[in-house]
Amino acid sequence: MNVRTYAEYQANNETPEILFWVGCAGSFDQRAQKVTKAFVDILNHVGIQFAILGKEEMCTGDPARRAGNEFLFQMMAYNNIQTMNMYAVKKIVTTCPHCFNTLKNEYPELGGNYEVISHAVYLQQLINDGKLKMKEGGEFKGTKITYHDSCYLGRANGVFEAPREVLQSLDAELIEMKRCKTNGLCCGAGGAQMFKEDEEGTSRVNWERTAEALETGAKVIASNCPFCLTMLTDGVKNKEKEDEVQVLDIAEMIARGIPNASL
Amino acid sequence: MQLVQQILFVLISAVAIFLFIKKISEIRRNILLGKDADCSDNSAQRWRNVMLNAFGQKKMFKNPLVAVLHFFVYAGFIIINLEILEIILDGITGHHRLFSPALGSLYSTLIGCFEVLAFAVLVACVIFLARRHIVKIKRFNKGELLGGWPRSDANYILAFEIVLMSLFLIMNACDLNLQQLHAAHYVHTDAFWISQHIAPLFNGLSATTLTFIERFSWWAHIIGIFVFMNYLPYSKHLHVILAFPNAYYAKLDAKGKMSNMKDIQNEVLYMMQPELAPTSTDPNAAMKFGARDVTDLSWKNLMDAYSCTECGRCSASCPANETGKKLSPRKIMMDTRDRLDEVGKNINLNKEFKDDGKTLLHDYVTVEELRACTTCNACVEACPVSISPLDIIMQLRRNLVMEESNAPQEWNQMFGNIENNMAPWKFSPDDRDAWVHAS
């Protein structure tokens, strides 16, 4: 893949236009890696000069902070801000809404001031600016799609329309779930729940949410978050619908809609 | 006789107002037991929030039917207060319908409007009672609202409003009948819009009986209002006052932003760059992380607790609560208020807080509840009076993890992974960019 690190840009006395913050899930989780690659394909397709931090990127500290471990969060934030300020990073795009929220809302008062943009909004801008054109009669034309609002892009940051507009560009049939936008139901992973067993209860949050998604009759559940992706995929498997219903990130769907994509 | 009534009226009013102010001052003191928090920036946006969320009740309109009913009760509450002004002046001066001569036919129109509102309030309250007891709306019949005081509190409030409105209408109906009998003192007005239809019920009664019913209703109505006013601070109904400041002081940042802990930020900074550390540190400045008791929370958190109406929209939207976990954001708010009331009583008794061996964490809110939160902000979004249960949950979690090292095993592993591998999973940091080269 055509991916360069900030260090490589700097070694050539070049400055990338944008930093692609990959995040831990996007870097290590096999499923989320596919989203990362799809997004890189899109960035390369539009010919933007982007860089990753590579081995210099660290966890933003989001799960530590939300689990209550502020020390660990501050350690991670300190290191990441040092790295990004050293490279004089101006603009960041990320495929993870948890990273997005932390970088955008929580790093500024720690000395990390950047323009931070989620991949949903970035894709919408590329489409609106005419830089990203979908091929005619793509894979999702006429397909029933339901969009799941991640808490950290949706309620937490008020991004509701951009991802929907991105999906509109695929000529798909968008069906809303009973609870959507500000009323959207969580997938169950936030607040560091991703990293522990559920507390005792009568059901699991991801099962509830998946049931709502399946009720719409959609063939694709579109998401914008690597954790939602995992939770909803597990939910679909639990309902034994994995042969009929796909859970995809909006970046994967867009990547499949552009001509000559490698995915 | 008239003078005795006037003196009695002034005395009752004075006692009612004195007791109300005393209790409100106590609540104010309790709220100020919370830690400082600066919520005064961007006043333009804050006033907008007051107009939209408090006056406009924006969040209520997620369910338009309930919103309209609630709006009647609220508008009734505010507008009928104008009529109470006349009632109070009548009581002090010994007049009857003081404003009537000056306002002429406009007076009857105004009272007519008040009556329509009173009737709307009455109907709305009956519907609200039915929603609780006949339709059995889930959020009113669940968890912390299953029995006891919270449930009675809601019933008392609704019953109280129904009785007050009925007294107001009966009083006017008898008045109309007395006017027709040309009874002394009962100045002539046009027929009031609602009570003219109730008046026939009292036809044929003597002037003495009618006067008795009219006077009884008048006194019961105004004393009822004074009693209700003094009931407010003990009840969830306090939201009629606190919803306004609570909307003003609500967080303006993105919902996803957690409050920063400056002490820890500095600690980390001095560890990484020791040259920046202050040379003299106060050895007595013991750091306390997160919140263990109500006095560790901010005053805004504590005002939130007194503003809570226990409507349960938060818990109905909470993914953890919906899937049968113990967490209920409404319970978090009720626990905070109960504990704060307990601390307040302790201070009343002992002049200053005397350790009672209890804390909000553990004695009220359990670890299991705190661990179930997904930080999804649904509770914050749902609250019509701008409360953040999430903010309290997160501060308690911080105490749990940083003061007690009380975290589930998996979280401790996750912490270890982040510390050693810079990712929450056990992967080598060297492989962070391995995806670039993988096929």
Image (cartoon, rainbow, N blue to C red):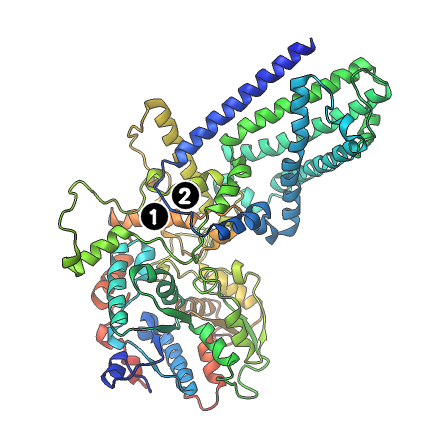
Query: Any mark on residue B301, and which?
Result: 2
| B309, above or below A210, in the image | above
Q: Position of residue B436 (x, y in %)?
A: 30, 82
Q: Chain of mark 2?
A: B
Indicate left or right for A219 with B282 as reference.
right
**In the image, what residue type sits under mark 1?**
Gln
**In the image, what residue type sits under mark 2?**
Asn
Q: Residue at x 32, y 54 (%)?
A: B260
Indicate left or right for B241 with B370 as reference.
right
Check whether the beta carbons of the residues at disc 2 and disc 1 lie within 8 A of each other.
yes
Mark 1 = which residue?
B395
Q: Secondary structure at mark 2?
A: helix
Q: Position of residue A44 (x, y in %)?
A: 39, 86
Q: Chain of mark 1?
A: B
Instruction: Estimate how packed mark 1 is, as few (under 14), some (14 to 19) or many (20 or more) residues with alpha carbons within 10 Å.
Output: many
Note whether residue A245 is visible: yes
The furthest residue to the bottom = A260
Q: Position of residue B51 (x, y in %)?
A: 57, 48
| B186, above or below B110, in the image | above
Work out which quarter of the rendered image holds the N terminus of chain B and state it. Answer: top right
Q: Residue at x 14, y 58 (%)?
A: B275
Instruction: Estimate how packed mark 2 is, as few (under 14), some (14 to 19) or many (20 or more) residues with alpha carbons within 10 Å.
Output: many
Q: Residue at x 36, y 31 (%)?
A: B343
Work out which quarter of the rendered image holds the C terminus of chain B and state it. Answer: bottom left
